[in-house]
């Protein structure tokens, strides 16, 4: 039995359905991220799990208990929002202890628990400050401590990092993950940032227009996106319309060039969407010798650690990355080049090519 079971969850606002038949089991201690663009329904699912929103239909079970109709305070959850949502007229200590006070814990118990939480978020010296005397990152750590103070069984985080600047975002992201591991608390995290999702999650749910488009580990989502949407969202730059040549040998055609893939489904249609990550491409001939493309360099973009190059192959373009090496001359626009890549890295997506 999974810790959290979400079955056939639907939500409509009036005639507008924003979550369609969402199903997922989440294990005890798992860190799951809902990833998707604005408006895809990820917050609405989180709010239904929290009890702030009532599903139009479907069921949510926690620890084998049907919580679908329970109020938020009956669900044993902690929640952290994007806007820090601390009580402005309360000190850090009072904010963290708030839920314990509501639960009528003794003053001594509250003090002890708040002290533990302050240690956990490494801010014991700020106990008597007010929220306006804290940085954004500190406020969000206090919000996290407040959410965890009552020892909830489930932690829900709704874009908790998106209001912070880039450096703090990365360090707080790592802190959240290590705290979550230490406490072993089952967590759901919402973000539209793919790098954040890849770095923090045990599993990612990629959402598109109210549907789970793909659920998998960061490794699988990144390396083996199944659809055009998932591939685009996790940054697979090369997506091409290709044709099936021979399913039994994995032969496909791109712009008149025959290529080989190990990833062709048995039931492949004749019009295929091929995808290739920029870092899967090598300059020159070689590799496993199965896939070589002749191309002409169009654009060279120096990014630091990598150099991203765009080149043309007949009617389509290919983007690929070279590691920066100051001793290697870079290709220049107009250069005729050869590219190779492994047949394992040439992906075949499930949906038809873009029109
Ligand atoms: P964001 O990243 O912008 O928060 P999201 O993926 O979390 O986006 P939701 O907030 O779940 O998306 O919203 C999904 C859809 O539901 C949107 O089209 C939104 O306008 C709509 N929606 C959300 N709440 C309501 C509401 N109370 N009444 C009507 N429509 C709503």
Image: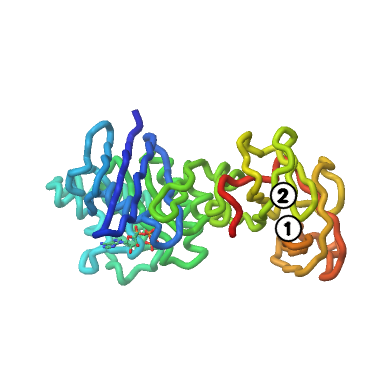
On the image, the x and y values in percent for residue 178 come to: 45, 46
Residue reaching furthest left?
104
Q: Residue at x 59, y 59 (%)?
A: 355
Any atom of ligand 1 within 8 Å of the CB at mark 1?
no
Q: Nearer the viewer, residue 318 or 256?
A: 256
Q: CA distance from mark 1 to mark 2?
A: 8 Å
On the image, the x and y values in percent for residue 80 come to: 32, 55
SS state under label 2: helix
On the image, the x and y values in percent for residue 200 come to: 49, 48
Q: Which mark is residue 320?
A: 1
In the displayed structure, would residue 154 be above or below residue 133? Answer: above
On the image, the x and y values in percent for residue 107 come to: 15, 49
SS state under label 1: strand
Residues under numbered marks 1 and 2 in contact, where contact means CB atoms less than 8 Å apart: yes
Ligand 1 falls in quadrant: bottom left
Residue 195 makes an appearance in the image = no
Q: Which mark is residue 280?
A: 2
Q: Nearer the viewer, residue 107 or 322?
A: 322
In the displayed structure, would residue 2 be above or below residue 78? Answer: above
In the displayed structure, would residue 138 be above or below residue 23? Answer: below
Residue 337 makes an appearance in the image = yes
Using residue 332 as the reference point, say whether residue 165 is left or right of it: left
Using residue 25 as the reference point, say whether residue 354 is left or right of it: right
């Amino acid at each position: 039995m999974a810790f959290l079971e979400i079955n056939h969850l639907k939500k409509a606002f009036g005639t507008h359905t924003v979550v369609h038949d969402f199903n997922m089991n989440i294990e005890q201690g798992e860190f799951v991220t809902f990833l998707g663009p604005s408006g895809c329904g990820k917050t609405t699912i989180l709010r239904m799990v929290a009890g702030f929103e009532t599903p139009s239909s479907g069921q949510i079970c926690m620890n084998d208990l049907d919580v679908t109709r329970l109020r938020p305070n009956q669900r044993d959850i902690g929640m952290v929002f994007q806007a820090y949502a601390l009580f402005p007229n309360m000190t850090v200590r009072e904010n963290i202890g708030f839920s314990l006070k509501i639960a009528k814990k003794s003053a001594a118990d509250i003090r002890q628990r708040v002290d533990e939480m302050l240690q956990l978020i490494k801010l014991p010296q700020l106990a008597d400050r007010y929220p306006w005397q804290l940085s954004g990152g500190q406020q969000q750590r206090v919000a996290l401590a407040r959410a965890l103070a009552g020892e909830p069984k489930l932690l829900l985080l709704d874009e908790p990092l998106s209001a912070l600047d880039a450096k703090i975002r990365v360090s707080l992201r790592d802190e959240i993950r290590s705290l979550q591991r230490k406490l072993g608390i089952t967590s759901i995290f919402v973000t539209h940032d793919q790098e954040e999702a890849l770095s923090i999650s045990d599993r990612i749910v990629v959402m598109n227009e109210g549907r789970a488009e793909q659920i998998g580990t960061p490794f699988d989502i990144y390396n083996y996106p199944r659809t055009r949407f998932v591939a685009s969202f996790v940054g697979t730059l090369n997506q091409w319309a290709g044709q099936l040549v021979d399913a039994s040998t994995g032969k496909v055609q791109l712009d008149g060039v025959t290529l080989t893939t190990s990833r062709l489904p048995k039931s492949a249609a004749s019009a295929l969407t091929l995808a290739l990550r920029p870092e899967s491409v090598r300059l020159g001939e070689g590799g496993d010798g199965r896939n070589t493309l002749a191309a002409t360099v169009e654009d060279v973009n120096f990014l630091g650690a990598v150099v991203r190059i765009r080149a043309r192959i007949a009617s389509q373009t290919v983007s690929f990355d070279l590691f920066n090496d100051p001793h290697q001359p870079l290709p220049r626009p107009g250069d005729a080049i050869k590219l190779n890549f492994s047949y394992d890295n040439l992906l075949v997506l499930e949906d038809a090519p873009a029109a």
